[in-house]
Image (cartoon, rainbow, N blue to C red):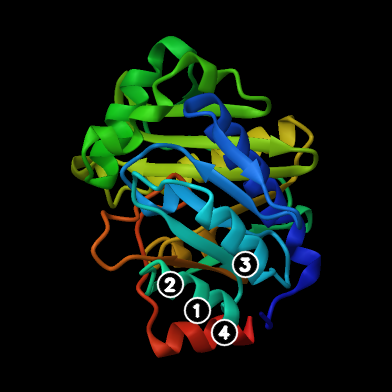
Amino acid sequence: MTYVHDSLGQFTTAYVDLMEDLAKVTTGRARRGRHGALLAVAGAPAASLNFVISPSSEPLAEDIAALAESERWDVPWSIQVRGVPGPQVAEEAARHGLTRLEIIPLMVRRPDEGMPAQQTYGSLQVRAIEAAELRLYVKVMAEGFGVPHEMFAMLDDPAVARLDGVAFYLAEVDGVPVGTGMTAVRGELNGIFNISTLPGHRRRGYGWAVTMELVRAGYASGAPTAYLYASAMGEPVYASAGFHTEEYLSVLSAPTQESNVSPKRAGSLSASPKAVSRARKG
C-alpha cells in the first residue's frame, strides 16, 4: 500500500491500542499478528467495530490473512488499512467477501492551533460521567446516530469506564442530555470519538461545542494534539474547529453487512472514485 505519511502512524497506533483494550474488556477477543496487525472483536453488530487492522504504512497481507482466518466471525467485520489498500490486501478482503470500500478522513488538530478559549453556548454544559451513567450515555449516543441501542451496548460495562485514559461525556441543556462525546488520551495524543447530537437539538452548534470542550480536556490531560476519524458530514465542521485532514483510513466490509456507524465517526462514507483519488493524494 502507498500514498500515506509514515509520520502519521502514531495516530493509527493510538487508535489500534484503544480498540485492543476495548475488545479485551468486552469480549476478550483481541490478538496481534506477527507483524503488528490487530484482530479486535468488540461484539457489536457493526463491521467497523470488529476488524483486522494494520497500523503500518506497509501492511503485510499475510499478517492480515493469518488473523482473519483465525477468527470464527459470528459478527459483521472488516479489514482496515491506512491509505489505499494494495492489491494483495484487497484480494485477501475479497476472499472473505469484503468488497465494500469506505474512505474515512483522519483529521488532526495540532498544538499550534492553540487551546480553545472557554466559551458559553447558551445553557449547554459538557461533563464527564461515571460508570453508573453509561447506560444513559449509550442510549443518547444511539439515538444521536440513529441506530439501535444494541449497536453500542458493549459500552455499558463498568470495565469500559475503567480503561486507562478513556473518558465519556454527556452534553446537557438545562440538565437534559442532548449529545455525547468520548476522549482517549495516549501520551500527548487525544483521540476524540462518539460526537453525537440528538435529532431535535441539531443545527445549534452543539457538536462543534462538544468537540471544543473535548479538545480542552485533552490539553488539561497533557495531550494537546487531538485526532479523530470524521464522517463526510462532519469533516467541514471539524475543519472549522482547527482540524486538518492528513490521511485516510480504508475500511473493507461486506456489502450486505449491518451499518458501519461506529464510535470513531458519526456516519459512513461510501468510496467514490473521487474519494479514492483524494486518499491517494493525501
Mark 1: which amino acid?
Answer: Glu
**Mark 1 or mark 3, whichever is nearer to me:** 1
SS under mark 1: helix
Residue 269 x, y percent position in the rendering: 37, 69
Mark 4: which amino acid?
Answer: Pro
Gap in angstroms between the C-alphas marked 1 and 4: 6 Å
Gap in angstroms between the C-alphas marked 3 and 4: 28 Å
Q: Residues within 10 Å of mark 4 (few under 14, many from 20)?
A: few
Disc 2 target residue: 95
2 and 1 marks in contact (CB < 8 Å): yes
**Quick one: label 2 or label 4, which is nearer the N terminus?**
4
Mark 3: which amino acid?
Answer: His
1 and 4 marks in contact (CB < 8 Å): yes
Disc 4 target residue: 87
Mark 2: which amino acid?
Answer: Arg
Q: Nearer the viewer, residue 235 or 268?
A: 268
Q: Nearer the viewer, residue 169 or 131?
A: 131
The residue sitting at 57% across, 63% down in the picture is 65
- Can you tell which mark lies on residue 91? 1
Residue 182 x, y percent position in the rendering: 51, 35
Residue 277 seen in render? yes
Disc 3 target residue: 244
Q: Disc count in the image? A: 4
